Image (cartoon, rainbow, N blue to C red):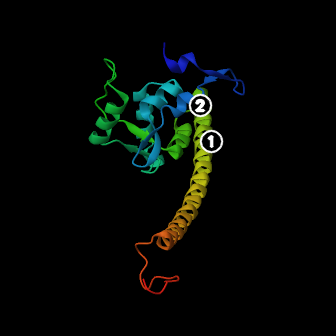
Amino acid sequence: MNTLHATLVLEPSAKYVVATPPDAVITGRIHLIRAQRVLLDRDLAELYGVETKQLKRQVRRNLGRFPEDFMFELTDEENEALRSQIGTLKQGEHSKYLPMAFTEQGVAMLSSVLNSEQAILVNIHIIRVFTRMREMLLAHHEVLQKLEELEGRLSTHDEEIQAIFDHLTALVSPAERQGRPIGFKPTGQ
């Protein structure tokens, strides 16, 4: 059974009840390509309940709405790398065209190109997932900065502790003392 259809959530705000996928289904399909978080055309088509070729056709008819930072076509190398990460495709799933990758802004623009109720509701849900991911990344970034500051302070302390240890070792070590011996020396010896 398809994981998308097995885990749909009903969206009661629509004119009629439309199922939207849970966050985990969407986040599982987000890839990092060219240092951008993107969703591929085939995944979006499945989420929207349309065929991939229909989605691509609508995008090609409206290319002016999709600049490079909204949507880009994968290169052969990127496609091969992605296919090796995901695994082998089932019979009939291989497309002769390179996949399109949509950024968060591109996904938002798709709602103006695909006018079905499901596409609009799923689009809203995807944008919310992207927003939550960005908020989580910002929170983690702040924690990471604080850890780096703490590490910097600790490394300074480590250097100071090492200097103290070196001084104590020099004071205690008799072999490193130089000069006249200190103390009382009886006459005649």
Residue placed under numbered mark 2 in the picture: 23
Amino acid type, mark 1: Arg
- Residue 159, visible in the rendered structure: yes
Sequence-wise, which precedes: disc 1 or disc 2?
Answer: 2
Vertical placement of residue 15 versus 131, above or below: above
Type of residue at label 2?
A: Asp
Q: Residue at x 43, y 33 (%)?
A: 41
Residue 139 locus on image (x, y percent): 62, 49
> In the shown orientation, is residue 120 left or right of residue 159?
right
**Residue drawn 45% across the image and 35% down it:** 58
Most foreground residue, 23 or 119: 23
Q: CA distance from mark 1 to mark 2?
A: 10 Å
The quadrant of the picture occupied by the C terminus is bottom left
Residue found farthest to the right: 13
Pointer 2: residues within 10 angstroms few (<14), some, or many (20+)?
Answer: some
Q: Residue at x 31, y 37 (%)?
A: 81
